[in-house]
Image (cartoon, rainbow, N blue to C red):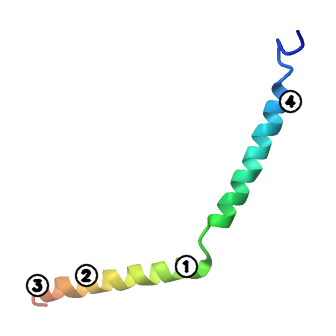
Amino acid sequence: MNNCCGAGYGKFIMGMATGMVAGAAVGMAMAPSHRQIRRAAHMAAKRVNEAVENLAEAMDL
């Protein structure tokens, strides 16, 4: 009769805490590096610049 009314809450909380810690560790391991972020930003800026140049050429500016 011990498992009837909340005896498993401790195990549930411990499992939840373990899952949160494991999720945070995996998230940190999968995060992109600063170099990758800078490279992606540089490439995006380059593409925007090219699009503006193409638009200016199309408008004969």
Secondary structure of the residue carrying tag 4 is helix
> How much space separates mark 4 and mark 2, taking CA atoms?
58 Å
Nearer mark to the viewer, of 4 and 2: 4
> How much space separates mark 3 and mark 1, taking CA atoms?
35 Å
Is 61 in front, or is 22? 22
> What residue type is disc 3 on?
Met
Q: Residue furthest right?
A: 2
Is 58 in front, or is 3? 3
Nearer mark to the viewer, of 3 and 1: 1
Q: Are marks 3 and 4 in contact (CB under 8 Å)?
A: no
Quarter holding residue 61: bottom left
Marked residue nearer the N-terminal end (4 or 2): 4
Quarter holding residue 58: bottom left
> What residue type is disc 1 on?
Gln
Residue ID at (86%, 30%):
10
The percent coordinates of residue 52 (x first, y second) are: 25, 83
> How much space separates mark 3 and mark 4, taking CA atoms?
68 Å
Residue under pointer 2: 51
Residue under pointer 1: 36
Marked residue nearer the N-terminal end (3 or 4): 4
Nearer mark to the viewer, of 1 and 2: 1
Marked residue nearer the N-terminal end (2 or 3): 2
Residue ID at (79%, 31%):
12
Give the crowd class for mark 4: few <14, some 14-19, many >=20 residues within 10 Å.
few
Give the crowd class for mark 2: few <14, some 14-19, many >=20 residues within 10 Å.
few
Instruction: Note whether 31 is above or below 26 in the view shown.
Output: below
Residue ID at (55%, 79%):
36
Instruction: Note whether 29 is above or below 38 in the view shown.
Output: above
> How much space separates mark 1 and mark 2, taking CA atoms?
23 Å
Instruction: Note whether 22 is above or below 28 in the view shown.
Output: above
> What residue type is disc 4 on?
Gly
